[in-house]
Amino acid sequence: MKLGASASELARPAIGTSGWRRFVRRFDWPLFALVLVLAGIGLLNLYSATARTAHSAKFDNQIMWTSIGVGCFFLFAALDYRSLHRLAWIGLAVTLVAIAVVRVLSDPIKGSVRWLDLGGVHFQPSEMAKLAVILSLARLLHDRAREELGPGEMVAGLVGIGASVLLIASQPDLGTSILLALIIGSVTALLVVRMWPLVCAAALGLAMTPLLWERMEEYQRSRVLAFLDPAADPTGAGWHTQQSIFAVGSGRVTGKGFLSATQNQLNFLPEHWTDFPFSVWAEEWGFVGSVVLLAIFAFLAVWVVNAAVRAPDRFGTAICLGVGAMLFWHVVVNVAMVVGLAPVVGVTLPFISYGGSSTLTFFVGLGLVASVSLRRQPF
């Protein structure tokens, strides 16, 4: 595997004037098909989750975000991912500024300050931070392998990446900060041979656990305690987990059928369009439907890892592994949260949960994977 690209390669335009046919021929159509299938399942599930409720307008909004996401997927697939090598630090800096602006200008929503109001559209910079961190980490690992990384740039990059995690944790957004840490750890573990930095980072994380507990909001502590003992407060902090488990279990083998989920339709299941869409799916389609959905996610993750293995340089490999880790950990944490194996931390299920910021993040991320896959051979 080629470990790096030259400066001339990084400056090469994405598609030449006569490259359209080659673009269509080499485009990763299976990857796009998997994304469309998941987006379609997400829309179907969201319609069921919000039908005959006061939240039915969310379905129309999600159609809009999905359409924009498809456009973003093709846009970033056509863009030569190597051109982002030079923009990685700028993207990280813009993300840090956006997160800081949120802390200063935005009002709390459900105890957290996470969203920017852009003319009536709520944008969550912490979602953008996932891609900015992936690109910055990819540049660090790429330049390190080519011995083009000075000590100053290494320190600045690590400080910027670490600052993004800490700023998001202070919003407070425990779920996203944990996901960022998992993404960083996964990519580093797969691409860095020496494991002692990871061991030190893990030890530091464990040592900071008491401090993190003190910095948590009261509702976050109650969610962790409810995870440890859901029955201790079944009508309070444990309500989400208990109702979610009831919904998943009541689906049995084949489910109750489309629009027939009682936990959903009777509003026993809270936040079922964002945090708990898998519960809606499991109740309506049962164990069989749940296995099918998870199998699609697993196949997509394997496909992304395959793109990482076949990438023409280390920068592309790290991008694919970062996006794959983001997809993998989102699914694992969300499903674990739904069935009571993890605390409720507000992590979305890719393409299934409602939300423009999350939807666009995954479309753009997988568009970057398509860009790497497209250029595994000289274009």
Image (cartoon, rainbow, N blue to C red):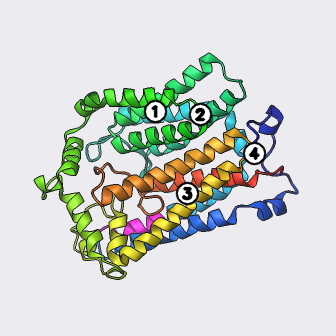
How many angstroms separate mark 1 from mark 3 (CA)? 25 Å
How many angstroms separate mark 4 from mark 1 (CA)? 29 Å
Question: Which of the 4 quarters of the picture holds residue 220?
Answer: top left
How many angstroms separate mark 2 from mark 4 (CA)? 18 Å
Residue type at the position of mark 3:
Ala
Disc 1 target residue: 164
Disc 4 target residue: 312
Pointer 2 or 1: first along the chain: 1
Pointer 1 or 3: first along the chain: 1
Using a 10 Å C-alpha cutoff, classify the residue at mark 2 as few (fewer than 14 neighbours), some (14 to 19) or many (20 or more). Answer: few
Q: Secondary structure at mark 3?
A: helix
Relative image position of residue 166 (x, y in whole percent) = 40, 31
Using a 10 Å C-alpha cutoff, classify the residue at mark 4 as few (fewer than 14 neighbours), some (14 to 19) or many (20 or more). Answer: many
Please name the residue shown 36% across and 65% down the image: 277
Residue type at the position of mark 1:
Ser
Disc 3 target residue: 301
| Residue 376 placement, left or right of 158 | right
Task: Between residue 295 and residue 360, name the one nearer to us.
Answer: 295
Disc 2 target residue: 192
Task: Between residue 20 and residue 8, name the one nearer to us.
Answer: 8
Identify the magenta region. Answer: 54-63
Pointer 2 or 4: first along the chain: 2
**Residue 93 is at least partly visible in this image:** yes
Residue type at the position of mark 4:
Pro
Relative image position of residue 311 (x, y in whole percent) = 71, 47
| Residues at circles 2 and 1 in contact by the CB criterion of under 8 Å | no
- Quadrant of the snapshot with the N terminus: top right
